[in-house]
């Protein structure tokens, strides 16, 4: 599923028409669940609740940005939640236990996430390990290192200014956490849609061999997306430490599943070659609104997990159906 194939691949660059087609499903789904919860829950459609949803979504959303880059190339990154936890623990250990200034601890925590992403990229490009296996290995390595740092203990207590990153609201709307998420979505969207490097990333996922024959350095761009994913994980780790005023080894547990779900629900194809930041933003809101609406209606978290699984199956099924129709239309155009 996660490897590129020469057969049945879509065009290496996601066209505007194809992008609109891919986004139609997530947009319809988003509108449907908003209408459903608006009818079912009187206090759902309020400005305060919308801001609450935006803040809730930020950590998962930042992880899903990196995941989208990876999935576009036909890969997967199972390590994002564990790298989040490792980066958070490095931040806490250096800033709280060692006593380094927090800005330096933040930079070093970012560096750790970037290194983890680089190792993933090297395992995929140099040793030719399948992305599933390479990032599963990093999953365990990062989780183990996070526990080794303090023997599995939590690190509690950060400076007030650092905590306020996740609580102080600017313009009565946004926290720094939500602003970082929206900024990264915008930058990622511009990078993918408007730069040569973004087009090359789509080309790698669309058809790796064709991209290579076209002169694209496939290893370079494969490496790049895993580095981006690792860095996004570190940013999320720093921000979650600010939110809960603590670092602990199992922070980010199962978050990789939410990141994958958000990207896939937003239209990213596990076969590679498709995905967008607009779709990821929509997918993030679908997951967050679903959780928020079900919580407001007192639905069990276990039921929420089941529903997310059903939605993923539905989203992947729609993607496969859309690809078949797109492939058939392309074949008809060529034969005509």
Image: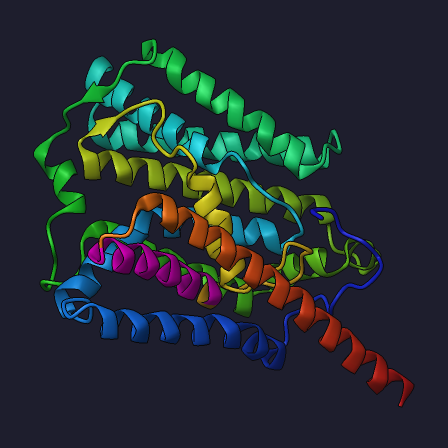
Question: Would you say residue 268 is visible in this rendering?
Answer: no
Quarter of the image where one finds residue 93: top left
Residue 160 is left or right of residue 304, and the answer is left
Please tell me which residue is depicted at 64% across the width and 49% down the height of the picture. Answer: 221
Residue 54 image position (x, y, % from top left): 26, 59
Please tell me which residue is depicted at 44% across the width and 74% down the height of the picture. Answer: 27
Question: Would you say residue 319 is visible in this rendering?
Answer: yes
Magenta stretch: dominant secondary structure: helix
Q: Quadrant of the C terminus?
A: bottom right
Closer to the camera, 133 or 108? Answer: 133
Measured along the vertical axis of the image, is residue 131 above or below residue 24? above
Residue 183 image position (x, y, % from top left): 33, 59
Colouring scheme applied when the structure was drawn? rainbow
Region of the chain picked out in magenta, as a range: 279-297
Residue 313 image position (x, y, % from top left): 57, 57
Residue 315 image position (x, y, % from top left): 55, 62
Query: Is residue 80 highlighted in magenta?
Result: no
Query: Is residue 281 highlighted in magenta?
Result: yes
Measured along the vertical axis of the image, is residue 83 above or below residue 169? above
Closer to the camera, 51 or 28? Answer: 28
Quarter of the image where one finds residue 222: top right
């Amino acid at each position: 599923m996660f490897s590129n194939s020469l057969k049945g691949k879509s065009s290496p660059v996601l066209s505007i028409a194809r992008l609109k087609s891919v986004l139609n499903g997530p947009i319809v789904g988003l509108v449907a669940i908003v209408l459903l919860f608006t009818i079912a829950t009187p206090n759902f459609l309020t400005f305060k609740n919308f801001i609450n949803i935006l803040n809730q979504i930020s950590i998962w959303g930042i992880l899903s940005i990196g995941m989208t880059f990876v999935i576009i190339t036909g890969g997967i990154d199972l390590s994002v939640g564990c790298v989040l936890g490792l980066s958070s623990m490095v931040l806490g250990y250096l800033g709280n236990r060692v006593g380094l200034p927090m800005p330096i601890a933040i930079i070093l925590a970012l560096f750790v996430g970037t290194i983890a992403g680089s190792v993933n990229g090297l395992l995929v490009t140099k040793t030719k390990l399948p992305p599933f296996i390479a990032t599963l290995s990093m999953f365990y390595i990062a989780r183990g290192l996070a526990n080794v740092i303090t023997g599995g203990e939590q690190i509690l207590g950060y400076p007030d200014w650092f905590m306020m990153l996740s609580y102080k609201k600017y313009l009565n709307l946004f926290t720094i956490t939500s602003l970082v998420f929206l900024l990264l979505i915008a930058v990622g969207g511009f990078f993918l849609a408007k730069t040569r490097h973004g087009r090359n990333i789509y080309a790698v996922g669309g058809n790796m061999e064709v991209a290579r024959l076209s002169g694209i350095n496939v290893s370079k761009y494969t490496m790049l997306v895993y580095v981006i994913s690792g860095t996004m994980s570190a940013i999320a780790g720093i921000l979650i430490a600010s939110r809960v005023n603590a670092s602990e080894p199992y922070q980010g547990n199962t978050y990789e599943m939410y990141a994958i779900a958000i990207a896939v629900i937003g239209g990213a194809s596990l076969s590679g070659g498709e995905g967008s930041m607009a779709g990821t933003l929509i997918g993030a809101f679908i997951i967050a609104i679903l959780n928020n609406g079900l919580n407001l209606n007192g639905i069990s978290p276990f039921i929420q997990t089941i529903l997310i699984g059903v939605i993923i199956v539905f989203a992947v099924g729609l993607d496969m159906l859309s690809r078949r129709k797109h492939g058939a239309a392309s074949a008809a155009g060529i034969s005509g």
